[in-house]
Image (cartoon, rainbow, N blue to C red):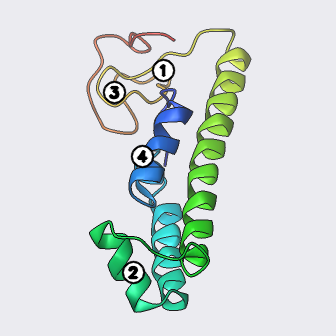
């Protein structure tokens, strides 16, 4: 489930670089984030314990020993950036298909049916059907 607001791809990448899968959490891609966390944990099985200790303590380590973890982390960052770009593109296509204007709920930000007096996603009552802000 995604919200209807644009996400910043660079922020998803920076968050993913700081902590693996955090960029996917920012994008609200929960299963994808769990998958990247799992891959990150799995990749640590291929990294020697001394290298992991050096990574955590900030000491020097052999880059080749940490390669599996670094590759998975880099792929996670790239994937978070790519997912944000694609989501923004699809949001723009939906907005254009709706005539350049999309009515959204003021509470949750998702699209609203014009014939309902409440948001179908969060049940927030609307003043008039379709009276939410437009994008």
* Label pair 3/1, CB-CB below 8 angstroms: no
**Element assignment for label 3:** loop
Relative image position of residue 40 (x, y in whole percent): 49, 74
Relative image position of residue 46 (x, y in whole percent): 55, 89
Distance between mark 1 and mark 2 Cα atoms? 57 Å
Give whichever of discs 4 and 1 has the lower sequence position: 4
Distance between mark 4 and mark 2 Cα atoms? 21 Å
**Element assignment for label 4:** helix
Give whichever of discs 3 and 4 has the lower sequence position: 4
Give whichever of discs 4 and 2 has the lower sequence position: 4
Q: Which residue is mark 3?
A: 118
Q: Which residue is mark 2?
A: 52
Q: Is residue 53 toward the left or the right of residue 63 in the image? A: left
Q: Which residue is mark 1?
A: 115
Q: Which mark is residue 15?
A: 4
Neighbor class of circle 2 (other Cα within 10 Å; few <14, some 14-19, many 20+) is: some
Count of marks placed on residues: 4
């Amino acid at each position: 489930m995604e919200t209807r607001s644009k996400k910043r791809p660079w922020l998803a990448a920076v968050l993913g670089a700081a902590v693996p899968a955090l960029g996917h959490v920012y994008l609200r891609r929960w299963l994808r984030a769990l998958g990247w966390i799992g891959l990150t944990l799995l990749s640590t099985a291929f990294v020697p314990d001394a290298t992991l200790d050096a990574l955590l303590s900030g000491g020097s380590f052999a880059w080749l020993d940490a390669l599996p973890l670094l590759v998975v982390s880099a792929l996670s960052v790239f994937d978070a950036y790519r997912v944000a770009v694609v989501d923004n593109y699809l949001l723009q296509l939906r907005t254009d298909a709706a005539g350049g204007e999309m009515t959204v709920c003021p509470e949750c930000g998702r699209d609203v049916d014009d014939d309902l007096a409440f948001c179908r996603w969060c049940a927030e009552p609307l003043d008039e059907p379709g009276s939410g802000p437009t994008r």
